[in-house]
Amino acid sequence: MRLTSGFWVSALVRRCFSENAYASVAARGAEEAGAVYLVVDRRDGTHDFYAPAPQSLFMQGGPGERLFEKRLAGAPREEVDARLASERRMDPDVWVVEIEDREGRVFWDVAEG
């Protein structure tokens, strides 16, 4: 069984704080099943952008798990904002979690490949 997006986002934010990173919810999407996007601010002017991984990669995780893939690495904020705007045009019910961490940690599973 998969957790609701709202519950999962709350848990991620708490995990970030417990690891001495700052996190906030920049956009709230559909409570039950909105897609979640992660933006990592490395505090040096660069950002990483993570999106839900394609279904074909879900064999790596267990049933009901969330998996992300890195779409942008070390990008300027403008590029991340443009990508998010594009995603919102396709699905306006997305969640956006912003994480500030100098080490660039995402605090969740990222698909390899």
Image: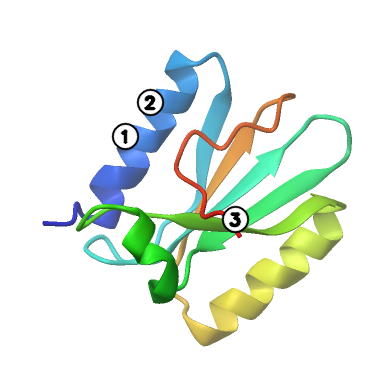
For the point 45% across and 39% down, the residue is: 108
Q: Dots 3 and 2: beta carbons under 8 Å?
A: no
Position above or below: 112 against 16: below
Residue underneath mark 1: 11
Mark 1 nearby-residue class (10 Å; few <14, some 14–19, many ≥20): few
Mark 3 to mark 2: distance in Å? 18 Å
Q: Secondary structure at mark 3?
A: strand
- Farthest residue to the bottom: give it: 90
Residue 45 placed where, x, y %? 88, 38
Mark 3 nearby-residue class (10 Å; few <14, some 14–19, many ≥20): many
Residue 36 placed where, x, y %? 44, 58
Q: Secondary structure at mark 1?
A: helix
Q: Quadrant of residue 33?
A: bottom left
Is residue 79 toward the left or the right of residue 35 in the image? right
Q: Dots 1 and 3: beta carbons under 8 Å?
A: no
Kind of residue at disc 2: Arg
Q: Secondary structure at mark 2?
A: helix
Mark 1 to mark 3: distance in Å? 17 Å
> Counting residues from the N terminus, which is met first, the one under dot 3 or under dot 2?
2
Kind of residue at disc 1: Ala
Which quarter of the rendered picture does the C terminus lie within?
bottom right
Residue 102 placed where, x, y %? 74, 24
Residue underneath mark 2: 14
Q: Dots 1 and 2: beta carbons under 8 Å?
A: yes
Is residue 21 toward the left or the right of residue 2 in the image? right
Judging depth in this view, the residue of 68 and 59 nearest the camera is: 59
Which quarter of the rendered picture does the N terminus lie within?
bottom left
Judging depth in this view, the residue of 36 and 62 nearest the camera is: 62
Kind of residue at disc 3: Tyr
Residue underneath mark 3: 50
